[in-house]
């Protein structure tokens, strides 16, 4: 379990469940009471039920953290691209890396060491294709020695039973498999490697490792959304994670991005889903707001790029999120997060995006998607009024 204070709020993270709890003053008091007397109230029962508290809960850590009152960074997750190499050529891919670059284990370890000191909660390994990195098992094993969780996003390429067993043994906590549709011909309109994904899901299903499916939502796969959700349920996936489609060098964005009517259709279908967690990527705050009738938690909604997470490219450069092109160099995670130019330009601003989004009634809980604005309008903060929920 990790415990940190940020902005007077207490954050708890439990890596075995991947759950984070954020506690306000009143809730902090209730937790401290429990830490001292061990008496379970309905509030404490709920924390156990959610997996925020587990058997690994050490009351003293909470008390110590509160006594120290040391403020940590808001940063919760690092997205690390360990390689640019990928054997697939997905039409939708936004990466556009031409050189093959691999992060060395030594460099990776130095990020993990610093991340642990900063009390980051989650290391999300990506790429390129992370499974083709020859030291992938060592990377996972190094994270597993910390209090941070190790998760991976993969196409499933090269995932044999043997490799999966090694990754589980090394301490992997969760895997997201990328699959845009369970209908092969539909998936192929945007992604390569259908059989790799399906095979990976088949072998994951026979293990206890938590896994989910990443589905980029586009015009060409929307009609197979419910079918793909049913498949994810049948296979025992923990979640289906809906990624907002972002511009890709090989495609014309407007030909694949959802129209307003398609956006509302997706929302109606999501409301029908039962029996599996539907997650929505940070760039899809407008969808989240619509689904919750505007009632979303300000702390955890909107674009979190450069706030609760940052991305590190295989060449060692830093970005607010892996989709944004604006790379910067820094000597450490701390230096980038506290002094990086782009992140500084977001600091002391309540909102990421300005101008057009600024005129929307949802600006305080949304954030649009800076990567989309950067690619379409050459200005990450331009915002847009062409949004289905613009108010
Ligand atoms: C770039 S891939 C890298 C990891 C791995 N090779 C894979 O395919 O999962 C990471 C995720 O980004 C998604 N992705 C790729 N192109 C995208 C785009 N244009 N918009 C949104 N997500 C995209 C992929 O489907 C995948 O889930």
Image: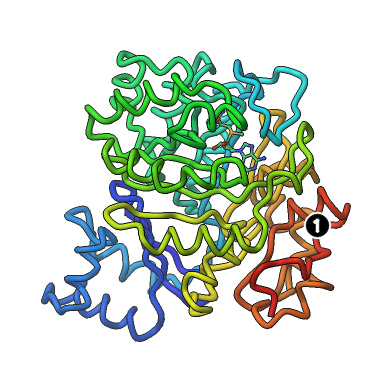
Residue 166 against residue 146 in the figure, above or below:
above
The part of the image, by quadrant, that contains residue 39 is: bottom left
- 88 left or right of 345? left
Kindly identify the residue that appears in the image at 40 percent across and 55 percent down: 278
Residue 98 against residue 364 in the figure, above or below:
above
Q: Position of residue 110 (x, y in %)?
A: 57, 34
The part of the image, by quadrant, that contains residue 164 is: top left
Q: How is the image coloured?
A: rainbow
**Can you tell me which quadrant of the image ligand 1 is in?**
top right
Q: Position of residue 100 (x, y in %)?
A: 71, 17
Label 1 sits on residue: 380
Kindly identify the residue that appears in the image at 24 percent across and 67 percent down: 47
- 350 left or right of 105? right
Q: Position of residue 328 (x, y in %)?
A: 79, 43
- 346 left or right of 64? right
Residue 206 against residue 368 in the figure, above or below:
above
All told, the count of numbered labels is 1
Q: Position of residue 357 (x, y in %)?
A: 76, 72
Q: Quadrant of the C terminus?
A: bottom right
Per the image, label 1 sits on a secondary structure element best described as: loop
Using the image as rendered, state which of residue 98 and residue 275 is in the foreground.
275
User: Going by the picture, which residue comes out furthest to the left?
Assistant: 39
């Amino acid at each position: 379990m990790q415990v940190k204070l940020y902005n007077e709020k207490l954050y708890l993270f439990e890596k075995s469940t991947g759950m984070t709890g954020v506690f306000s003053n009143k809730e902090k008091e209730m937790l401290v009471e429990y830490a001292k007397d061990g008496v379970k109230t309905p509030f404490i029962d709920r924390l156990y039920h959610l997996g925020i508290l587990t058997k690994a809960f050490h009351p003293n850590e909470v008390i110590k953290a509160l006594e120290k009152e040391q403020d940590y960074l808001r940063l919760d997750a690092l997205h690390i691209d360990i390689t640019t190499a990928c054997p697939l050529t997905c039409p939708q891919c936004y990466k556009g890396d031409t050189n093959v670059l691999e992060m060395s284990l030594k460099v990776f370890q130095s990020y993990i060491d610093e991340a642990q000191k900063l009390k980051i909660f989650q290391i999300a390994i990506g790429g390129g294709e992370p499974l083709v990195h020859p030291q992938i098992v060592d990377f996972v094993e190094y994270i597993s020695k910390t209090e941070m969780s190790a998760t991976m996003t993969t196409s499933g390429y090269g995932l044999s039973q043997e490799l999966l067993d090694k990754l589980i043994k090394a301490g992997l906590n969760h895997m997201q498999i990328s699959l845009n549709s369970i209908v092969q011909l539909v998936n192929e309109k945007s992604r390569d490697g259908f059989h790799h994904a399906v095979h990976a899901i088949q072998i994951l299903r026979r293990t206890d490792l938590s896994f989910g499916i990443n589905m980029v939502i586009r015009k060409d796969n929307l009609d197979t959304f419910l079918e793909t959700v049913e498949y994810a349920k049948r296979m025992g996936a923990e979640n289906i994670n809906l990624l907002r489609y972002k511009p890709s060098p090989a495609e014309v964005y407007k030909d694949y991005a959802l129209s307003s009517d398609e956006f509302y259709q997706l929302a109606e279908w999501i409301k029908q889903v039962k029996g599996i967690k539907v997650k929505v990527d940070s760039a899809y705050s407008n969808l989240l707001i619509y689904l919750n009738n505007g009632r979303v938690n300000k702390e955890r909604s909107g674009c979190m790029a450069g706030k609760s997470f940052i991305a590190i490219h295989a060449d060692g450069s830093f970005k607010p999120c892996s989709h944004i092109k604006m790379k910067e160099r820094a000597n450490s995670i701390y230096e980038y997060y506290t002094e990086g130019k782009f992140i500084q330009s977001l600091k002391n601003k309540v909102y990421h995006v300005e101008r057009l989004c600024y005129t929307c009634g949802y600006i305080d809980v949304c954030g649009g998607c800076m990567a989309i604005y950067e690619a379409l309008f050459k200005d990450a903060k331009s915002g847009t009024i062409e949004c289905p929920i613009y108010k």
